[in-house]
Image (cartoon, rainbow, N blue to C red):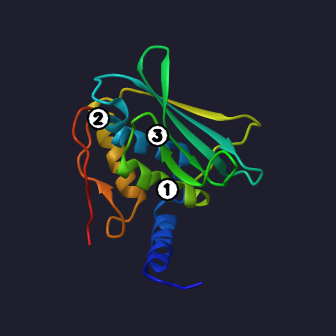
């Protein structure tokens, strides 16, 4: 196998992430990523609810992750899912559904799922895990942006530059 620039980039990124996230919770990081890209999951609605459902592999790591969006009470749409292992029904990686799309969220989910052992993993209680995330406040959005920025080396990958309940999210690459 070739060791091209992408392979080296991921090695350096993994080392930087490991140093900065020794005790950072995987659940908190996922929650923060959802909050940072809240507008992408709300399709313009002012309020809503997000569920992040995850399942475990036999190794204790997460095998799948599903993000559900609710704009109207009792009505849920699958926004995206991430699978670590393929099956006849799905491939590996992130896939958006029902008109949802977020390059920034896809980028963060990809990296977090590929490097999840460098975070504090949630306990496997023999069932699926669930995070419920209500509409964030401006303060919660700012905190989420800070946590995501701390979790990733700003010189190596995209990071959110603006965070807020109704603000536009964009990415910047810092060299």
Which mark, residue 31? 3
* Left or right placement of residue 136 versus residue 162 in this view: right
Quick check: 15 above or below 165?
Answer: below
Per the image, the residue denoted by label 1 is 110
Quick check: 62 above or below 6?
Answer: above
| Neighbour tally class for label 2: few under 14, some 14-19, many 20 plus, Cα within 10 Å | few
Tell me the quadrant of the picture where the N terminus can be found: bottom right
In this rendered view, identify the residue nearer to me: 106 or 161: 106
* Left or right placement of residue 160 versus residue 90 in this view: left
The secondary element bearing badge 2 is classed as helix
Mark positioned earlier in the residue sequence (1 or 2): 1
Q: Across the whole image, how many numbered discs are drawn on residues?
A: 3
In this rendered view, identify the residue nearer to me: 61 or 105: 105
Q: Residue at x 38, y 65 (%)?
A: 153
Q: Residue at x 67, y 54 (%)?
A: 85
Q: Residue at x 26, y 45 (%)?
A: 169
Tell me the quadrant of the picture where the C terminus can be found: bottom left
The secondary element bearing badge 1 is classed as helix
Distance from the alpha carbon under mark 1 to that under mark 2:
26 Å
Which mark, residue 139? 2
The secondary element bearing badge 3 is classed as helix
């Amino acid at each position: 196998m070739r060791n091209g620039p992408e392979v080296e980039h991921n090695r350096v990124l993994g080392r930087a992430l490991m140093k900065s996230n020794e005790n950072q919770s995987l659940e908190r990081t996922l929650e923060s990523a959802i909050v940072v890209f809240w507008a992408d999951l709300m399709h313009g609605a002012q309020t809503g609810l997000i569920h992040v459902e995850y399942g475990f592999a036999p190794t204790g790591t997460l095998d799948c992750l599903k993000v559900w969006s609710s704009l109207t009470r009792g009505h849920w749409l699958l926004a995206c899912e991430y699978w670590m292992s393929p099956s006849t029904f799905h491939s590996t990686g992130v896939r958006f559904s029902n008109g949802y799309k977020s390059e920034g969220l896809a980028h963060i989910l990809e990296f977090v799922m590929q490097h999840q052992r460098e975070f504090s993993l949630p306990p496997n209680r023999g069932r699926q895990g669930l995070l419920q995330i209500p509409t964030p406040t401006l303060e919660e959005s700012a905190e989420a942006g800070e946590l995501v920025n701390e979790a990733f080396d700003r010189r190596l990958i995209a990071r959110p530059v603006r965070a807020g309940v109704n603000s536009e999210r964009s990415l910047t690459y810092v060299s």
